[in-house]
Structure formats: structure tokens, C-alpha cells
Amino acid sequence: MLRFIFRRLGYGILVILGVIIVVFVLFFALPGDPISVLAPPSADKATKEAIRKEFGLDKPLYMQLAYYLNDLSPLGIHENTPQNLRNYQYIKLLSFSDKVLLLKVPYLRRSYQSQKLVSAILLEDLYGTIILSVVAMFFATLVGIVLGIIAALWQNTWVDYTLVTLSVLGISMPSFVLAILVAVIFGFYLQPYTGLSLTGSLWVDDPFTGYKLQLKNLILPAFTLAVRPLAIIVQLTRSSMLEVLSQDYIRTAKAKGLLFRQVIYKHALKNALNPVITAVSGWFASLLAGAFFIEYIFNWKGIGKTTIDAVQALDLPVVMGATIIIAIIFIVVNILVDILYAVIDPRIRLK
């Protein structure tokens, strides 16, 4: 088990390294100059060059990438000056000349716009994305399993055909298109009846009472985010139930005179849900990444909206930090899903 985990973590580090390099290069290929964000509009050329040097933007791209990876590494060599070391939480391991080897917390740098620590910004926003994803996944799992069972029990009827057609439509429709439709229909045209806002976050700043919890703002983005996994769970549950219902032990249970309800819930459903559970586990990480455009459209405060805003503002440290966090979540969730496979199905061995 430990060997499997360490090997997957090693692969994960290589994946993160590849993602960092690709995003870093792509970001610098975009039109625009980060100095336009860092420098005041009235700044002269000398001021802009000084700011460029302060943030290391005057160095070649490969050197900027090397310095960034050095900041991310738990072990790094840095200049042994108080001004440079103030950015890190560290333990000094070895000093030589004007350099020092540090064991440190990975440093994601500071936002170009707000000068806040990127780690603090993203951890604050990640809360909103996790809440949105968890609620969406819970709704998709609960409703998807129920509808999948109904479709299987009423196979080849109008109920089955309707549910399968709707699930195919849910899988096919892009999330950002669905988000716009849901926002306009339920948050604008039907707003007098639904009472739901077109946009809004979980916490709303009230000038008189401070921050107020607005759970109703969660409904539309969570529903939109849940549609695609819900549609997949419906089809997966239906297929799994039909396969289980054709097994010999189900016919034996019916021949013994067990009630239909007992056959379904005690025998069929228990075995049919194994592939559904593992699929749900794998989908959670995908929801975190898929929430980007939905958060932006619904103006939901989360890591997705923050990242899109950072791309528009050429705020490289925030973009890179968000990319790294999402990549880490994917890797950790995939490892947990592989372990869950082995727990649910003893025939699977982790090597």
C-alpha cells in the first residue's frame, strides 16, 4: 500500500511540474505586460524598470521559472539576507557564502494586484469552491441513483426513454451554456416566482449587519454544476442495475418468494452501487475544476472566479497558485479513488 502511494505521489509531482512549465510558458505567450498591473499609470520608464527588476521580470524566462520552482520546493537555496528570507517560513539547514539552504513551507509568492499572499487568497476562495462542489455532488449522487433505479425498473417504457434522453442531453450540453440558460431563466425571467438571484455568493456583505449567509445563492450554481455528473450517474446506475437484475442470484431470490422491495434493496442495489460509488469519488475532483466558468457566470466567490479574474489581470502568481492547488487535489483524489477501488472490490490489488 505505501509503495503504491509513494509511487503515485512521485508521478503526481512530475505531473505538477509539467503543468507548471506549460502554464508558465503559455502565460508569457499571452499579449500584455504584467508591469501594467504593478506600476501606476503615471509611472515613467525608470520606475517600470525598477519594478520589473524587483519582481524578477527582467530575467530570461527560464531563470524566472527556475526561481519559481525554487520557491515551491520544500528544500531551496536562497540569498541569506533578511529582506529575502522574510517571505518564507523556514528552518536553516546549511549556510555557505551569501546563500543558505532552507527547509521551508512552499512559497506561492504574492499577488501582483493586492500584494497579499497567494496561499492566503486561494485558501480563502477554495472554501467556496469546495462547498459548491460538495453540494452539487451530493445532489447529483442522490437524484442520479434514484432516477437510474427507476429507469432500470421501467426498462423500455416511456419513463426509461425520457430519463435516458434527458441524461444524454445533460452529458452533451457544455456547462457554461447550461449556466447561462439556468441563470437567465430561473434568476431573471422567473425570479419573481423562484426568489433566486441571477448572481451572488454564499456570504453577502451587508453594510448594516456585516456578512450574511445566503444559502439561496447556492441553488442555481450547484444545480448547474450537478447536471453533468447527475446524467452520468443515471446512466451508470441504470446499466449496473440491469446487469445485476439479470444475475442468477436475483432469480433465486425471487423464486424464494422474497418481496420485490427486498430483492431490489437488499440484493440488487447493494451490488449495483459499487461502480457508482467509485465513479462519484472520481468526479469530485473534476467538479472542482469544472466550477471555473460556473463560478464566473454566477459571480460565485471561489477559486475558479479568482483564477479567471487573475488571468484577465495578468496576475501570474495567482494563476500559478490556483493551477498547482487544483493539480494537487486531482492527484490526491485519484490516489484515494484507487484505494477505494481495492476496498470495495477485493479482487483489485494495489501494486
Image (tube, helix red, strand yellow):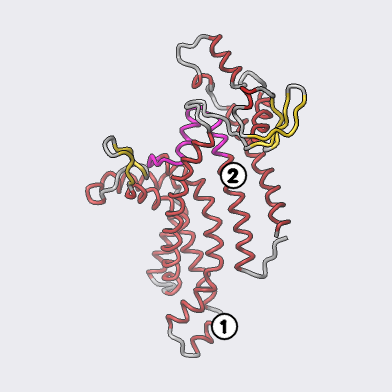
Q: Which residue is drawn at 54% across and 11% down?
A: 47
Determine the secondary structure under disc 1: helix
| Quadrant housing residue 246 | bottom right
Q: Which mark is residue 248?
A: 1
- Foreground tag (1 vs 2): 2
Q: Which mark is residue 272?
A: none
Residue 290 spot, x, y in % from top left = 49, 46
Tell me if mark 2 has few (under 14), some (14-19) or many (20+) residues whose alpha carbon lies within 10 angstroms of its own.
many
Q: Is the magenta stretch mostly helix, strand or loop?
A: helix
Three-letter amino acid code of the residue under disc 1: Asp
Sequence-wise, the earlier of marks 1 and 2 is 1
Left or right relative to 304: residue 51: right
Vertical position of residue 264 compared to residue 129: above or below: below
Residue in the picture at 46% in, 63% down: 234
Residue pushed farthest right? 96
Say which residue appears at 44% left-offset and 73% top-offset.
155
Which sits in the foreground, 97 or 264? 97
Q: Name the residue under label 2.
A: 327
Dividing the picture into quadrants, the one containing residue 339 is bottom right
Q: Which amino acid does label 2 sit on?
A: Ala
**Magenta-highlighted residues:** 297-323
Q: Is mark 2 on a helix, strand or loop?
A: helix
